[in-house]
Amino acid sequence: MRGIANFYGTYAMYVCLCKGVTDKQIRNAINEGACSMRDLRESLDVANQCGKCGRDCKSLLNESALAGAASPMQSAQFVAA
Ligand code: FES
């Protein structure tokens, strides 16, 4: 992840510099149901240009999956979304 932006009063990190997408935008997309790189590509257009952000996007997906595995309620919401 590269760069820092002031995003509505909080700090966010740019993950995709080509498309100007931050970690918060990716986390929001994941919370709204994106569960694969295909979902993130379709919803945010990340990893479609140089591809350098792909690894960080996958890390955020894995982080979310691990957090969901730790919390059965979140897992249920994740599957239902
Ligand atoms: S940094 Fe995301 S496509 Fe280039």
Image (tube, helix red, strand yellow):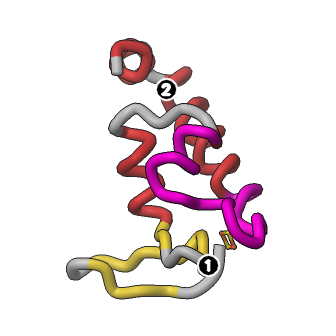
- Give the spatial CA distance, label 1 vs label 2: 29 Å
The reply to whether the C-beta atoms of the residues labelled 1 and 2 are less than 8 Å apart is no
Mark 2 lies on residue: 68
Answer with left or right where residue 68 lies relative to residue 76: right
Whether residue 42 appears in magenta in the rendering, the answer is yes
* Magenta region, residue range: 38-56
Q: Quadrant of the C terminus?
A: top left
> Where residue 71 appears, x then y in whole percent?
44, 22
Answer with left or right where residue 24 lies relative to residue 23: left
Vertical relation: 45 (above or below) 21: above
Q: Quadrant of the N terminus?
A: bottom right
> Where residue 80 appears, x then y in whole percent?
35, 14
Whether residue 58 appears in magenta in the rendering, the answer is no
Q: Residues within 10 Å of mark 2 (few under 14, many from 20)?
A: some
Mark 1 lies on residue: 18
Q: How many marks?
A: 2
